[in-house]
Image (spheres, grey):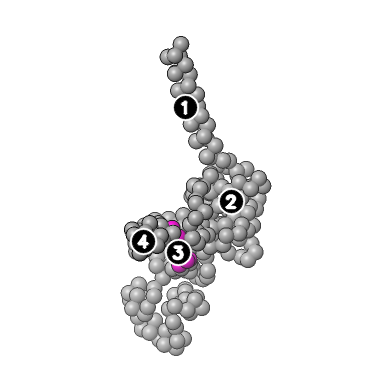
Amino acid sequence: MSKRFFVSVFVFFLHLVSFSQSQSLLVNIGGKIFHNPKSETNRIVGTPYTQSKFAYAEIERIPDKHFMRYNAYSDNFEFITFKNDTLEMVKIDDINTITFTNPYKKYTYLNYISSAKGRTKGFFVELHSKGGFTLYKKESITFYAGKKARNTQETDLPACYSKVSESFYFKTKTGNVIPFPESKKQLTKLYPDKKDAIDVFLKENKIHFDNLEDCFKIVDFLAQ
């Protein structure tokens, strides 16, 4: 009897684990695109979100709008249900764009070349497009683990998220998404055959590579 009891308990335990795992994947009306995100402690200082509040967004290939927000630490989107359950989107290639309507902000899921990671994928904010060139902004947040004080002379350092950092990329006519040049030297290196034209353009327009409006002008110049 004890052996049968042990087997029954073990089988029940397996079913319980299986049920628990199945509950971690939830299905949206548009298909399996959301699952439960990992819970995070409330003691962490800062936020992983570019905007903590959920806002209406349109998801490519999904007919209905949803309340969503972007997690810049995990580089993913979260969605809130009518029951106030927070779900995380499963990244799939069929869903490439997510657009917030008010205020307007369009995210695109792209293959890109990172100086730190090499060729990878991620979400970008689309800023400006002309003649086959598109300028994107990458929003990032870093997590720092907390640190316990080693003695009474020190204080505990809480776990925290950094402020949002921004880097810029652009899609060339060949379709590659690469880091946007940060200097005349980098721009000329990308387009050595246009060196003279680049010199004239930068001088006449007094271009500053750390000015967003000037970055738009650079994209327009390359699109000519």
Crowd tier of the residue under label 4, counting other residues whose Cα lies within 10 Å: few below 14, some 14–19, many 20 or above? few
Write down the residue under mark 2. 79
- Mark 4 or 2, which is nearer the eye? 4
Which tag, 2 or 3, sits closer to the chain's start?
Answer: 2
Q: Is residue 160 magenta?
A: yes
Q: Given the image, on which type of amino acid does mark 4 rest?
A: Thr
Write down the residue under mark 4. 152
Q: Is residue 203 left or right of residue 28?
A: left
Task: State the residue at coordinates (33%, 78%).
Answer: 185
How far is disc 4 from disc 3 in space, using C-alphas? 27 Å
How far is disc 4 from disc 1 in space, using C-alphas? 47 Å
| Element marked by disc 4 | loop
- Mark 4 or 1, which is nearer the eye? 4
State whether residue 132 appears in this view: no
| Element marked by disc 3 | loop
- Mark 1 or 2, which is nearer the eye? 1
Which tag, 4 or 2, sits closer to the chain's start?
Answer: 2
- Mark 4 or 3, which is nearer the eye? 4
Q: Given the image, on which type of amino acid does mark 1 rest?
A: Leu
Which tag, 1 or 3, sits closer to the chain's start?
Answer: 1
Which tag, 1 or 2, sits closer to the chain's start?
Answer: 1
How far is disc 2 from disc 3 in space, using C-alphas? 23 Å
Q: Are marks 4 and 1 in contact (CB under 8 Å)?
A: no
| Element marked by disc 1 | helix
Q: Given the image, on which type of amino acid does mark 3 rest?
A: Ser
Crowd tier of the residue under label 1, counting other residues whose Cα lies within 10 Å: few below 14, some 14–19, many 20 or above? few
Residue farthest along the bottom direction in this orientation: 204
Q: Given the image, on which type of amino acid does mark 2 rest?
A: Phe
Write down the residue under mark 3. 162
Task: State the residue at coordinates (46%, 11%).
Answer: 1
